[in-house]
Amino acid sequence: MRIATAELIRELDRRTIEEVGIPGAVLMENAGRGATRVLREQFQNLQEGPVVLVCGGGNNGGDGFVIARCLHEAGIESEVFLLAAPDRIRGDARIYFDALDGTDVPVRLLKDEGISEDVLRRWQGASCIVDAIFGTGLARPVEGLYRKAIEAIEAARRPVFAVDLPSGICADTGKVLGTAVRAECTATFGLPKRGLYLYPGAGHAGRITCVDIGIPERLLDELGVREEIFEPASLVHWLRREPDTHKGTYGHLFVLSGSLGKTGAACLCSESALRCGAGLVTLGIPKTLNPVMEQKLTEVMTLPLPAGKDETLSSGGLEEIKEFASSVKGLAVGPGMGVNEETGHIVRALWVDVDRPMVWDADALTLLAGNPDLRGKQSAEIIVTPHPGEMGRLIDKPVTWVQENRVEAARSFAEQWGVVTVLKGARTLIAAPDGRLRINLTGNPGMAAGGMGDVLTGMIGAFLVQGMEAYDAASFAVWLHGAAGDLTARTLGPVGFLASEVMQSLPRQFRELLEEQECSPSD
Ligand SMILES: NC(=O)c1ccc[n+]([C@@H]2O[C@H](COP(=O)([O-])OP(=O)(O)OC[C@H]3O[C@@H](n4cnc5c(N)ncnc54)[C@H](OP(=O)(O)O)[C@@H]3O)[C@@H](O)[C@H]2O)c1
């Protein structure tokens, strides 16, 4: 599903009005009518009290006026509370404000009376509060009367329905600008806005329904909408297998992972690759740790390599590593491999010389952060999978900045370094070097636990060696990783499950996905 920023939706509106010839007032009528339909579907109790509509002075408020009129037509009592002076209401919103004169919908001007006890009581008696204060036009932090109105909506403790966006949420970043409405559901217009899916905005939007207001599909293609909520349907065929295939068909992954105290990362990463269908997996490990790995791993092969300091890989093994890398389809590098001069030397050489697709994670990213000169010097498609702390190190910014600017951080790193960038966290982002961006909706807070990232790295590696393009391999693995986590949480409980349990639920997750798509691995 494609999504939009405020600027993009403005451009889509403009072209629909000017080039296609659909008047703005028709778009607003479509928006308001569609929102009313969603409101009536989502809230069954609208006859139990008046629907309170809190409206701003822009077009979002205009949508609110249309909703009030549509409710009136449907015999549902409503009351409009206006936060802007009527003489400031212009354009299409003005048309629908004036149209309320032909109804008996009461309009109260809060601009003059403020949020009195009486107003609050009215809101407390509402069946539902419709928030039509700000949409994509919110331009600065919410203050004054607007802030008080949003606080009073919260204080009224009634179900809230947001028009286009919960007021106070930035359409592009999901940030709360001052304060924001918390909605039970949101009807958004044309295309869902990006900020509805990014935290904290995602926590304010509730259930999201997109209303078609008449923007032609071809305009989305012409404008090259490059952002979407990732959906796996187009990649599910990768899970289907022809009968006359063998392990060689599904690629060989070389995993460089693990050091003293971090053998678990190596196990999770390499076993997850097998769980995601890689034909063969070889784990390159410091020789001294090989006996442990031989015990822990059964299906994964090991390549014992010269050990250096602290039982990490020694740079003396570099030629052997490179030679082995040239015999496989792809590499997964980094989980628990240790950060020191020797591993630094190894990853530098891999970045520049290895011409197989690779996924880089964890310690490999910390080592990369110390080597800004490597930018653009890779010989293959590379996917990096930083968590916010690692991203902060890579771009030399505090983690708080990364979290507040997740899209910018992921996208600019992908573009500048020429790598697919997976910025992990609630609503993981996948950014391609050419500007495409996907938001992932699967996953749950029970997955905030050690080892989950190692599993993801192995999963991405598995899809790379099966021949998937890097952007798709990263997106598919991220989606499946979250979905398998959701399945594990449903089966075992919301907290306390292990990364290895998420890994073990992958085959069941594949079966569920294939069944949903009405096909099976063998047909
Ligand atoms: N084609 C259409 O007409 C169409 C189609 C579909 C949907 N829509 C609706 O239109 C909305 C966008 O309308 P819009 O561009 O007019 O923007 P808006 O979201 O309605 O907000 C703009 C209004 O809010 C004010 N404002 C912005 N930030 C403020 C703040 N922090 N405090 C106080 N006032 C503030 C602006 O005043 P200042 O001028 O002082 O900044 C302006 O009056 C969409 O979200 C959607 O709901 C329109």
Image (cartoon, helix red, strand yellow):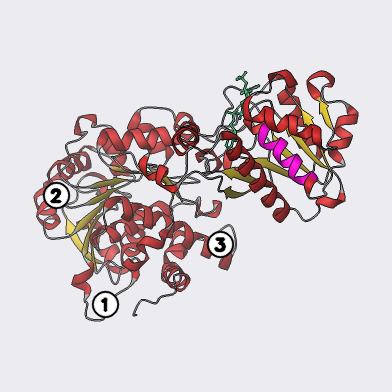
| Image-based side of 318 in relation to 363, left or right | left
Report the magenta residues as a range.
62-72
* Image quadrant occupied by the C terminus: bottom left
The answer to if 30 sits in the magenta stretch is no
- Residue position marked by numbered label 1 in the rendering: 242
Observer able to see residue 211: yes
Of circles 2 and 1, the one toward us is 1
Query: Which amino acid does the dot numbered 2 rest on?
Result: Asp
Nearest to the observer: residue 256 or residue 214: 214
Determine which residue is flagged by label 2: 355
Would you name the residue on which mark 3 appears?
489
User: In terms of sequence position, does the residue under pointer 3 or pointer 2 come before the other?
Assistant: 2
Q: Residue at x 44, y 46 (%)?
A: 428
Asked if residue 68 lies in the magenta stretch, the reply is yes
Dot 3: what SS? helix
Amino acid on which disc 3 is placed: Ala
* Circles 3, 1 touching at the beta carbon (< 8 Å): no
| Amino acid type assigned to the residue bearing label 1 in the image | Glu
Task: Select label 3 or label 2 by which is in front.
Answer: 2
- Mark 2 burial class by Cα count in 10 Å: few <14, some 14-19, many 20+: some
Query: What is the spatial separation of the Cα atoms under label 3 and label 2, in whole angstroms?
Result: 39 Å
Dominant SS of magenta comes to helix
Disc 3: CA contacts within 10 A as few (<14), some (14-19) or many (>=20): many
Between 203 and 102, the one lying in front of the other is 102
Determine whether the beta carbon of the residue marked 3 sits less than 8 angstroms from the nearest atom of ligand 1.
no
